[in-house]
Image (cartoon, rainbow, N blue to C red):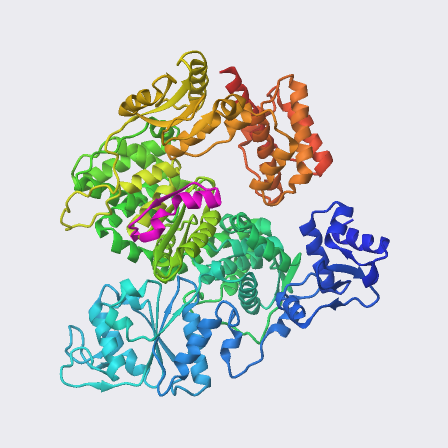
Amino acid sequence: MTRREKIIAYLTECKAVQQSTALTTNEIASALNIYRSNVSKELNQLVRAGIVSKRAGRPVRYWLGDEPRVLLDPFEKQKIEDTKIGFAAHTSLGEKAQKLTVPHTENVFENLVGSHDSLKNQVEQAKAALLYPPHGLNTLIIGPTGSGKTFFANTMHRFAAHKNIITKKELITFNCADYAHNPQLLLSHLFGYVKGAFTGANEDHEGLIQQAEGGMLFLDEVHRLPPEGQEMIFYFMDHGMYSRLGETAKMHHGDVRLICATTENPESSLLQTFVRRIPIVIQLPPFEQRTVREKLQLLERLLTLEANRIHKNIKLNEDVVQALLGSVTYGNVGQLKSNIQLVCAQGFLNSMQNEDEITLSFEQLPPNIKDGLSHLASDRHELGKLTRLLETTMIIKPDAKRGLPEVDSYELPYNLYDIIGDKAALLKDEGLDQTSINNFIMTDINLHMKSFYQRGKLGKTENRLNEIVDREVIDLTKKIRHFLQEQEGFLVRDNFIYAMSLHISSFIKRVQSGKPSRKISTDLVSMAHDFPTELALAKRVKEMIAAHYRFPIPDSESYYMAILLVSVHSDLKNGRVGIVVAAHGNSTASSMAQVVSQLLSVDNITYYDMPLEMNPKVALDGIATRVKKIDRGNGVLLLVDMGSLSTFSAKLTEKTGVKVKTIDMVTTAMVLEAARKTTLIDSNLATVYRDLREFVGYSHSGEKLKEKQTLITKSATKQKKAIVAICATGEGTARKIKELLDKILLDNLINDITVIPISLVKMDEQIKKIQEKYLIVATTGVVKPKVAAPFVSLKTLFQGGAENFVNLIEQLDEGQETNNTFLKHSKALTEETGQKYLAEYFTFLNPGKIIQVLWKYCDFINDKTNNTMSNAFRINLILHLGGALERFLTRSSMKVRPELLSQMKREKLYPLLEEANKLVQKKLNITLPEDEIYYILELFKTEQQKIAD
């Protein structure tokens, strides 16, 4: 019996058929032992289906009736209707979509998703700019790549044409980035030229301004206009006059409205004389700041466009919807559109035998889009909102009213589905089976789309990289990539050019600045030796760089290069240090984060724009939200510009529970370096923070060497660290304290702290002498001394609180905190504690239900092995099992090579684990894959090795 059937049966059993006997969500959830959120979701779906009636108020009550209805006030009723964005379990989306499709009105902005919500102010600004007498106002649209600037400009143009504000009905568009490296050619396109203006100008030629006469000219990426071009544009805005390239005496009059767009901060990327002449600045939000309802509406519209192309229904489930929405990490609506085109192409290929419908299944999604599900799950609040709006199964029908989109930067210049159909027929005639046909065509689809988007906006980031590092470095990096991929068969990710270019450039700048070679840790050397292939290639790459620049490179660079190669060869998702860029200004931080996200394709960076007049307390709350969202369990680096933001570290750590380190005077180059550092497999917050404090920028050829920069903060002397233990005599108790602390420090591999026992007699004098040689990091004993260091009482110390010292020490060393010591010494570990851990770390599990099963699992192993399982290991095992269950539920179980699975079955512990897994199977009806059992076995082997050591 399904959840829904159980709920209906229970309502019937309780005779909840009228308001007086109606039941609440909690009553139903408690009686059926079903998670409350699942009951709420099912009840709302039953209400929408007309099976259950609902009464507004607190608490909300539900009942079955002969004529089910929802008793709501008008506002609540409208709110329910607004959530029906076209997804339905039993009715097609197309039928509901027709209700949602706004009939053609005089206001074309009504069809814009978000026109009454996140884009409400932007729409009002656009209308004001277009209707302002006598000729309207020029407009600048700001927003990250893919946020819809071109679409918004087109909507403004359609509005103006419909209102007869303009006479020319065609929108003239020009992308300033296309000719950014040839200013003369750029200006000739805009303003035209006369015969003889330059070599090859054999006749007069009109420019785009003349072509747009009586209408609108859309200048995309206007920040790429050279200064002289901006000056000519603002002269035209002032006087309505311009001259062609090569003209000296003649002036032309023009009646053209200008819409400009940029991804950059106009205050720093455009001339202020240019910006001042654009009175209307419209800021478009990134995809992540859109409401959940808007995201679903955008998804539905983009899927409808694909349905119109293929003339078939598109069927998908809620997992696919969540994966698609979660897959948007840097490219906003543009990225969502390209991802939808890819999965629809794959679905079309797999459903060619079905004339009416294509099915998009989660199992067939590309890995990067599948990852969207776990990415979305990291924001529980967002996921909760989305879950309440989704149905189990969704059907998208072609909608003739919407037609096909106008061509934009994310629109393929051909019908991909025609290509698929023709190629499939050709391969079938050649005698290939369906699996081979699918493999051939999907490879072709990926190449088509990758090639197109590399030529389009998402592929233009190399130009920006060229603004940060020297072209010579980029060319050398391309040679290195060719060597790795073509000669050595070592495949690298798309962001290799950016990661390696920045690494080389940073190294050269370090040499130019006279910085000493970096000290290399034994841990990094050991880690590099764990990857012999990458280390060997790194040595070859080091030789290529040395030969190119004709100066010797230290051997230590091979180890850094090896770690970099491992990082670009494998895609790390968890454990990265998060990055928050926060700066004063309306788009300063977002612009820097946008550039870095595009260049490096990273998903561990976010931003917070802080207007100058914003209250610091408001900013603190806003940044705290960003910190919690971007944290991957390895701490967060806060990069700020100045002022109050630089003092937020401790407050943010206290507020969020996330370790935060702050660096001020942020630049785009610093954000790039931070993102690059955090992708390395050995990166942690302390390492990234230390390296960035020493970062001196990227090199440019021809650049004069600047004076050596002084570090912002530098420790005057490197003092040894000490913990002071105090007792009456300096012997006895103090010695026991020293033995205890020495053992704890040794267990935690802390070897740079000395424990010093002292007597109460002349305690202050002794402490002063100690402070001459040592930095006192903590104190303990019979009294608390007057020292600016944490104090732990003897009672707390001997009752298991010694781990506080470890936490304090690790915080001082900018390392990660650990609860293992607490778990190891605590005697109060209970199922409730385990439940709290599960609730903290997992999204799709019900901790209250599975903790009993996992606890019994641990007890079973404990009894059968006759070994006492430590609390630390029990929690580790419970969390590992919870991860295995969640991976099973999200269809993302880990994989192990067949030969390792074969070896596993010969292990002594394997039969016992099989028996224990039967408990899970019996209680939860889940059979863990053998690949997961392998990792459970490895966990036990590691613990046994610790005990043996």
Which x, y percent locates residue 700? 20, 50
Q: Tell me, yes or no, if residue 170 can be seen here.
A: no
Q: Which residues are magenta?
A: 643-668
Which residue occupies the foreground of this view, 210 or 14?
Answer: 14
Residue at the outermost front position = 761
**Residue 510: quarter of image:** top left
**Residue 585: quarter of image:** bottom left
In the image, residue 93 sits, relative to residue 716, either above or below, namely: below
Which residue occupies the foreground of this view, 306 or 940?
Answer: 940
Q: Viewed as shown, does residue 772 lie left or right of 739?
A: left
- How many marks do you count on the picture? 0
Magenta span includes 652: yes
In the image, residue 610 sits, relative to residue 845, either above or below, namely: below
- Residue at x 67% of width, y 66% of height: 92
- Residue at x 54% of width, y 19% of height: 944
**Residue 887: quarter of image:** top right
Q: Tell me, yes or no, if residue 815 can be seen here.
A: yes
Which residue occupies the foreground of this view, 331 or 721?
Answer: 721
Q: Viewed as shown, does residue 949 lie left or right of 83?
A: left
Which x, y percent locates residue 14? 85, 54
Magenta span includes 708: no
Which x, y percent locates residue 769? 28, 21
In the image, residue 24 sits, relative to residue 94, either above or below, namely: above
Which x, y percent locates residue 392? 66, 56
